[in-house]
Image (cartoon, rainbow, N blue to C red):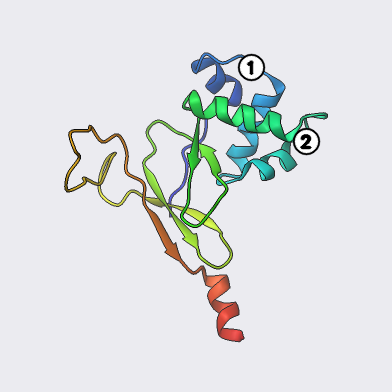
Amino acid sequence: MHTHATPAPAEEALRRADLRVTAQRVAIYRALADHPHSSADVVFAQVRETVPGIALPSVHNVLGDLVSAGIVRRVSLPDSDRALYELAEPVDNHHHVQCVMCGSVQDVECAVGHAPCLTPSDNHGMRVLEATVTFRAICSDCERKQQQE
């Protein structure tokens, strides 16, 4: 099972990325540290308790800023119209496994070695930076429920 390295404190990560440290950015960073693979809606629900008055569009804007700065990674999954977000650790190289029934997402180690870990048969003259893989599966909870029905 993949485990994330301990993330840098929010303030430190923001300063390293030359971003101003704000209550909104810190709260969103911490929410993702505690709950990776969260949608903007889930992050909003988590931070509105600690940052009164924050609005959903503000959460989307901060997530966009953090993705642009390389602090947060946007995870796009097949058959999903919503993006999920996780902290982007620079030495981290992993893929995802997603339950096709309940949508739960977990990290899995890279398929082969270091980034980009997979090589296309033809890169069309481009330098590949990363390869993302999503393993589609059925989690054990959904499997059990399906067998009981």
Report crowding for label 2: few under 14, some 14 to 19, many 20 or more residues within 10 A (C-alpha): some
The reply, left or right, for residue 128 in relation to residue 46 is left
Residue hosting label 2: 48
Q: Amino acid at mark 2?
A: Arg
The image quadrant of residue 9 is top right
| Mark 1 residue element | loop
Quarter of the figure with the N terminus: bottom left
The reply, left or right, for residue 132 in relation to residue 52 is left
The reply, left or right, for residue 48 in relation to residue 33 is right
Where residue 78 appears, x then y in whole percent?
Answer: 46, 55
View extreme (right): residue: 52
| Mark 2 residue element | loop
Tell me how many marks there are: 2
Q: Amino acid at mark 1?
A: Val
The reply, left or right, for residue 140 in relation to residue 93 is right
* Residue at (57, 71) in percent of width and height: 141
Quarter of the figure with the C terminus: bottom right
The image quadrant of residue 23 is top right
Where residue 41 appears, x then y in whole percent?
Answer: 68, 44
Q: Earlier in the sequence, mark 2 or mark 1?
A: 1
The image quadrant of residue 102 is bottom right
Whether residues under marks 2 and 1 lie with C-beta atoms below 8 angstroms apart, the answer is no
* Residue at (60, 20) in percent of width and height: 11
Report crowding for label 1: few under 14, some 14 to 19, many 20 or more residues within 10 A (C-alpha): some
Mark sitting on residue 21: 1
Where residue 125 appears, x then y in whole percent?
Answer: 17, 33
Where residue 101 appears, x then y in whole percent?
Answer: 55, 68
Q: Is residue 136 above or below residue 130?
A: below
Q: Is residue 8 visible?
A: no
Gap between marks 2 and 1, in whole Å?
18 Å
* Residue at (58, 38) in percent of width and height: 33
Mark sitting on residue 121: none
